[in-house]
Image (spheres, rainbow, N blue to C red):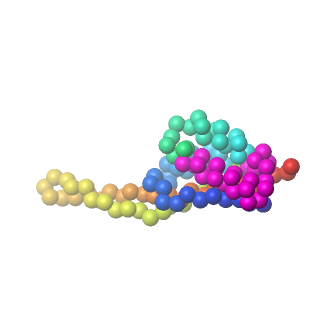
Amino acid sequence: MEVSAVAKYIRVSPAKVRRVTNLIENKQAEEAMRILDFVHSDNARTIKKVLKSAMANAQNNFELDSKTLYVKKALVDKGPTFKRMKPRARGRADSIKKRTSHITVILEGRGG
């Protein structure tokens, strides 16, 4: 049985978040939590929050044991991009793209 949790409109580039999500794919959920504890990135805190939410969904809604859960997929999709202008010399302006991400963590129960 698959259980998921989603965090949308996270104000960080999807490429930066994917670096961290690649570390936890195909790992046990509790092991993934320990891995995220030792990753020095603010993105790891957000991913850990989503993972914790997915584990809570599995326990409360489907009565699955947290020891049997593993991370089947950790997806990072591109959200809307906020466009801002930065004033430059001689009356010019540069555009700045502030990217957002949608983070999805899908857990699955194995054995047990």
- Residue 14 rendering spot, x and y as whole percentages: 50, 54
Taking the view exactly as shown, the residue that stands out farthest to the bottom is: 80
Corner quadrant of residue 2? bottom right
Q: What stretch is highlighted in magenta?
A: 46-70
Which image quarter holds the N terminus?
A: bottom right
Residue at 52 percent across and 36 percent down: it is 40
Taking the view exactly as shown, the residue that stands out farthest to the top is: 38
- Residue 6 rendering spot, x and y as whole percentages: 59, 59
Look at the picture and state if 59 lies above or below 81: above
Taking the view exactly as shown, the residue that stands out farthest to the left is: 90
Residue 27 can be seen in this image: no
Residue at 34 percent across and 62 percent down: it is 83
Residue at 49 percent across and 48 percent down: it is 16
Q: Nearer the viewer, residue 59 or 24?
A: 59
**Magenta span dominant secondary structure:** helix
- Apparent side of residue 87 relative to residue 108 in the rendered image (left or right): left
28 falls in the magenta region: no
54 falls in the magenta region: yes
- Apparent side of residue 83 relative to residue 29 in the rendered image (left or right): left
Residue at 69 percent across and 56 percent down: it is 57
- Residue 43 rendering spot, x and y as whole percentages: 51, 46
